[in-house]
C-alpha cells in the first residue's frame, strides 16, 4: 500500500483528455504545494512533468497540467497522443521531511 | 544536459551488503541535493534517501533507516548509497535523482541500477 493513492489505471482515446488523481493527507499533499508528477515509460527513467502542483519544466508539452484541491492533486493530459501511454506517479513532500509517492497509474491510449 | 550514471548493482544474498554509486556531470554537483529512489517489480516508485548539497544533512525512508547510508564526495561528483542488512524486498531498480530543492522535485534521473536480493 502506497502512501498516496492513485487509480491503478486510466484510459482514453487519442485527442481526448484524462485526469489522474493523487490523494494524500494534510501532512503531505494538502499541507504543501510541493506535489510533482513523473512519467515513466517501460525500462526508462522517470521524467518530471509537473512540479509544485502546477508548474511545467521547460520542454514539457502544455498539454500537461496540474492542480490541487485539499488533499487531492490532479494531473490532466489533454489532446492525448499515443506517446503519452506510460506510467504516471505523483510525489509529495511530507511533514517529516521525506517524500511519498503514489502507487502509479497506468495510462492506456486506446 | 545533466548526466547521472549509477553503478554497483548486482545479486546479493539476504543479509548482505552493496554500495551503489552515481557519477554526476554537466552541472555544479555541490549546488544540489540528491536522492535515491527505487522501483520494485510490480510496485511503484519509493523514495529511499536524500542528502543536501553540502552532505551535512541526510534523510531516510522508514523502510531503510538504520540499514542504508547515503553519502557524497563532492570532489568526485559522486553520490553513494551503502546498503547493509539487505532484504528480499529491497530488490529493485535504484535510481539517483537530482533535486530542485532539498528533497523534491526530482528534475533529472539516472538510468538506474538493478539490485537483486535472494533468499
Image (cartoon, rainbow, N blue to C red):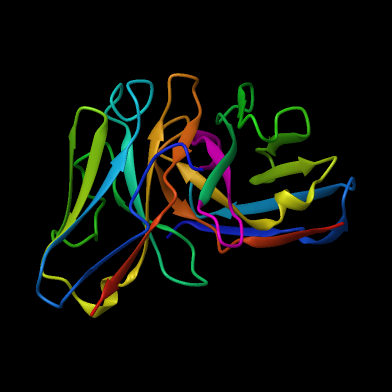
Q: Is residue B1 left or right of residue A60?
A: right
Quarter-of-image position of residue B6:
bottom right
* Residue depicted at x 65% and y 38%: B74
Q: Is residue A100 magenta?
A: no
Q: Nearer the viewer, residue A18 or A65?
A: A18
* Residue depicted at x 21% and y 43%: A55
Quarter-of-image position of residue B41:
bottom right
Q: Nearer the viewer, residue B16 or A56?
A: B16
Question: Where does the C terminus of chain A fall, quadrant-wise?
Answer: bottom left
* Residue depicted at x 24% and y 54%: A58
Q: Position of residue B32 (x, y in %)?
A: 49, 36
Decide: is B2 above or below A14. Answer: above
Q: Is residue B30 magenta?
A: yes
* Residue depicted at x 47% and y 72%: A42
The residue segment tinted magenta is B28-44
Decide: is A11 above or below B108. Answer: below
Decide: is A63 above or below B88. Answer: below
Q: Nearer the viewer, residue A97 or B22?
A: A97
Q: Nearer the viewer, residue A66 or B32?
A: A66
Quarter-of-image position of residue A104:
bottom left
Amino acid at each position: 500500500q502506497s502512501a498516496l493513492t492513485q487509480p491503478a489505471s486510466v484510459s482514453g482515446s487519442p485527442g481526448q483528455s484524462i485526469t489522474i488523481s493523487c490523494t494524500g493527507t494534510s501532512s503531505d499533499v494538502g499541507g504543501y504545494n510541493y506535489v510533482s508528477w513523473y512519467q515513466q515509460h517501460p525500462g526508462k527513467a522517470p521524467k518530471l512533468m509537473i512540479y509544485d502542483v502546477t508548474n511545467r519544466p521547460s520542454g514539457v508539452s502544455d498539454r500537461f497540467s496540474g492542480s490541487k484541491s485539499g488533499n487531492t492533486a490532479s494531473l490532466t493530459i489533454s489532446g492525448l497522443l499515443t506517446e503519452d501511454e506510460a506510467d504516471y506517479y505523483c510525489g509529495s513532500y511530507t511533514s517529516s521531511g521525506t517524500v511519498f509517492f503514489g502507487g502509479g497509474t497506468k495510462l492506456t491510449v486506446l | 544536459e545533466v548526466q547521472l550514471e549509477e553503478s554497483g548493482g548486482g545479486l546479493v544474498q539476504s543479509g548482505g551488503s552493496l554500495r551503489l554509486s552515481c557519477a554526476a556531470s554537466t552541472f555544479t554537483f555541490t549546488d544540489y541535493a540528491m536522492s535515491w529512489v527505487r522501483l520494485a517489480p510490480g510496485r511503484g516508485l519509493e523514495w529511499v534517501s536524500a542528502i543536501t548539497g553540502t552532505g551535512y544533512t541526510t534523510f531516510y525512508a522508514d523502510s531503510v533507516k538504520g540499514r542504508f547510508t547515503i553519502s557524497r564526495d563532492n570532489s568526485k561528483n559522486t553520490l553513494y548509497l551503502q546498503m547493509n542488512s539487505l532484504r528480499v524486498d529491497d530488490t529493485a531498480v535504484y535510481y539517483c535523482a537530482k533535486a530542485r530543492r532539498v528533497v523534491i522535485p526530482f528534475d533529472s534521473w539516472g538510468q538506474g541500477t538493478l539490485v537483486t536480493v535472494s533468499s
